[in-house]
Image (spheres, rainbow, N blue to C red):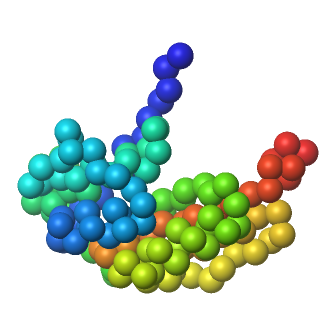
């Protein structure tokens, strides 16, 4: 059965530093789709973050590239299997040079934290109690 994928394309200022940042979070790089202009970060079987140099990114759009440290362009949200996994990933991101973003959201059945990566893109990490989703 066909499984739809999502490719999140993000402009980055320093491709080598961004590669290092995401590998420090535990993600792998698919070298088959990576070169001096891009790094293919495997988030899961169906989610790929394509980190593109700003020059290469600009070949895909005529729009101005947003400076994500000054303006919001997108909020990327990833699910986590537990509250502990939320904390683990966000803490890894901060240790790797990212910065905390916003306040911890704890609503009992749902828990989330967020970080900004090296270029200011915001990544939310959220756990939701499966019983709350089902019922």
Q: Can the viewer see residue 89 in this picture?
A: yes
Instruction: Report the label total.
Output: 0
Q: Residue at x 62, y 83 (%)?
A: 103
| Residue in view at x 50 percent, y 83 percent | 100
Q: Is residue 2 left or right of residue 117?
A: right
Q: What is the x, y in percent for residue 117?
A: 37, 73
Compare residues 95 and 79 and report the one nearer the observer. Answer: 95
Q: Above or below — where is 72 with respect to 41?
A: below
Is residue 70 shown left or right of residue 25? left
The quadrant of the image that shows the C terminus is top right
Residue 63 in which image quadrant? bottom left
Residue sitting nearer the eye, 10 or 17: 17
- Describe residue 7's horizontal placement relative to residue 88 as left or right: left
Question: In the rendered image, is residue 72 in sight?
Answer: no
Give the residue furthest to the top. Answer: 1
Q: Residue at x 29, y 51 (%)?
A: 29
The foreground one among 53 and 43 is 43
Residue at x 67%, y 55% (from the top left corner)? 81
Residue 87 location (% of width, % of height): 61, 73
Residue 68 occupies quadrant: bottom left
Q: What percent of the width, then of the height, locates residue 73?
A: 38, 65
Q: Position of residue 56 (x, y in %)?
A: 12, 54
**Residue 126 falls in which quadrant of the image?**
bottom right
7 shown above or below 126: above
């Amino acid at each position: 059965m066909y499984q739809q994928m999502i490719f999140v394309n993000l402009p980055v200022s320093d491709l080598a530093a961004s590669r290092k940042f995401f590998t420090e979070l535990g993600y792998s790089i698919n070298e088959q789709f990576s070169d001096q202009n891009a790094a293919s970060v495997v988030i899961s079987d169906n989610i790929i973050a394509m980190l593109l140099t700003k020059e290469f990114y600009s070949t895909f759009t005529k729009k101005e590239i947003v400076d994500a440290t000054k303006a919001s362009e997108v909020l990327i949200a990833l699910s986590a299997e537990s509250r502990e996994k939320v904390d683990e990933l966000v803490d890894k991101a901060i240790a790797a040079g990212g910065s905390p973003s916003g306040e911890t959201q704890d609503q009992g059945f749902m828990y989330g934290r967020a970080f900004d990566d090296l270029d200011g893109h915001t990544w939310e990490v959220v756990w939701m109690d499966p019983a709350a989703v089902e019922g």
